[in-house]
Image (tube, grey):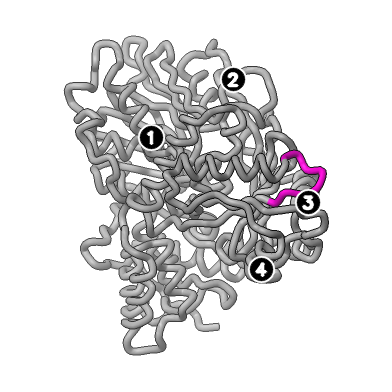
Amino acid sequence: MTTLQSVPALGTHPASGSLPSRAETRDQLSRATYDLLVIGGGILGISTAWHAAQSGLRVALVDAGDFAGATSSASSKLLHGGLRYLQTGAVKLVAENHFERRAVSREVAPHLANPLTFYLPVYKGGPHGAAKLGAGVFAYSALSAFGDGVGHVISPAKAQRDVPELRTDNLKAVAVYGDDQMNDARMALMTVRAAVDAGAVVLNHAAVTGLRFTRGRVTGADLKDSTDGTEFGVTARLVLNATGPWVDHLRKMEDPNAAPSIRLSKGAHLVLKRTRPWRAALATPIDKYRITFALPWEDMLLLGTTDEEYEGDPADVAVTEADTAQILDEAAFSIKDQQLSRDLITYSFAGLRVLPGGPGDTSKAKRETVVTEGRGGMLSVAGGKWTTFRHIGRTVMNKLADLPGHPLAEDMEPMNRLPRKLPLPGIANPNAVAHRLLVDGPAPGPRMAPDTARHLATHYGSLAFDIARLANEHPELAERVHPDAPEIWAQVAYARDHEWAETADDVLRRRTTLTIRGLATDDVRERVEKLLADRD
């Protein structure tokens, strides 16, 4: 194995925008008074910061951990209309979800999303019949204006050609529909980048230790940088609590008597090696309301999800043996045993859905966004779903514009005057990017491997050319991080210098796919940590 030379912080093409140091960012956050301080770097906080910066507000965003470090990188990786919502008659909601899904996957981030065909198997004795599901997928595709084709029903034999591990015993028919898929951590990170490009100042690994008050109003926060212990503060005219599962924790900092506003549902997933290629996903009905997914994702197979109420510390959420057994048992309804061997599991993860407070089964609860204002004037936003992250950002901005006294309205551009489908950085046709990377290749030296070129194109879009440039200028960075993964060392240096990566987990779990592939070995982790430590 070639030893990486010490690679200090790298200057790249001017368009790629080197980041200021953490000390510089802390100083910038401490000296200014911001219009809006967003606490929480999950996709809701990120989206709000992006829209607020677009509107002309002076915006700061902080997170106690990494961007998308919790719930927002623990989703089912789908941009979807919500097929199950049709059962409750939520036709308008499905249509709105489809609008957002198509906007993101076709105009906002086509380099980060890809269409995915879903097969919904109908088994003898199952919770739904073929006629009902056939009508359902037709209606679902109609609400998407047939942009993904017409929902229809096919034979088991045809479905098995695309999903060779499909269980065909007692399989009567297969309903077909279309949605989209993404890498949620990469999508969130590109949205952070968009917020910064629009003027926001951001810092991860900075935990709130207390709120600042002026005459009873929340006017900022005191923070501690977890990388070196530095304490600092941010002053703002308005503070937005977008801390996801921790939203009530921050509300109690504002008001110790604040009543609980949310409840949590745990969703666990398993990642497995695939035994054979899959050209479609499976969405298998478990009962009247629940569906279990088997999704080809990042050359792997993603199984899940569970949906159970969670009452513990959000920081302790984890996949249990019971979760693993449930996911494998439910997957076995439609997948052959050889694909469900525990030996194929490379990774598991669990996230917490934030649901409105109240009684009832969490699987039937609405995935709606709740915006509340506390007694100290802090706004809290919670809930929603990945597909509608842009809509949620606009919703919060409209709430800001309508606050009593309109404290920010005169300083911000109305949402209806801003571009509705502003693209994320790197927007490009990923096929064209991959072709360019293969044709141009590093010179001198061997050409880029096809799997690496495709990986870079679908995770960075046109920004992949900056990474290729690093590999050209530093040949040791053109080598693979692990022989069984497409990632190269230039991505680690790029994550360090341009994507706010501070820890090995930031790189291995969220900037790359090495952890989910089961390839974050001790040796890989040690070498990543060394490269991260070589920053200026």
Front of the two marks 3 and 4: 4
Q: Are marks 3 and 4 in contact (CB under 8 Å)?
A: no
Query: Which badge, 4 or 2, is on the more N-terminal residue?
Result: 4
Q: Which residues are magenta?
A: 121-128
Residue drawn at point x = 30 percent, y = 29 percent: 36
Q: Amino acid at mark 4?
A: Arg
Q: Is residue 476 visible?
A: yes
Front of the two marks 4 and 2: 4
Q: Amino acid at mark 3?
A: Phe
- Give the total of numbered labels: 4
For the residue carrying disc 4, how many other residues have a C-alpha within 10 Å: few (<14), some (14-19), or many (20+)? few
Q: Where residue 357 is drawn, which disc sits there?
A: 2
User: In the shown orientation, is residue 492 left or right of residue 315?
Assistant: left
| Residue at mark 4 | 161
Query: Which badge, 3 or 4, is on the more N-terminal residue?
Result: 4
**Cα–Cα gap, marks 4 and 2:** 44 Å
| Residue at mark 1 | 391
Q: Is label 3 in a helix, a strand or a loop?
A: loop
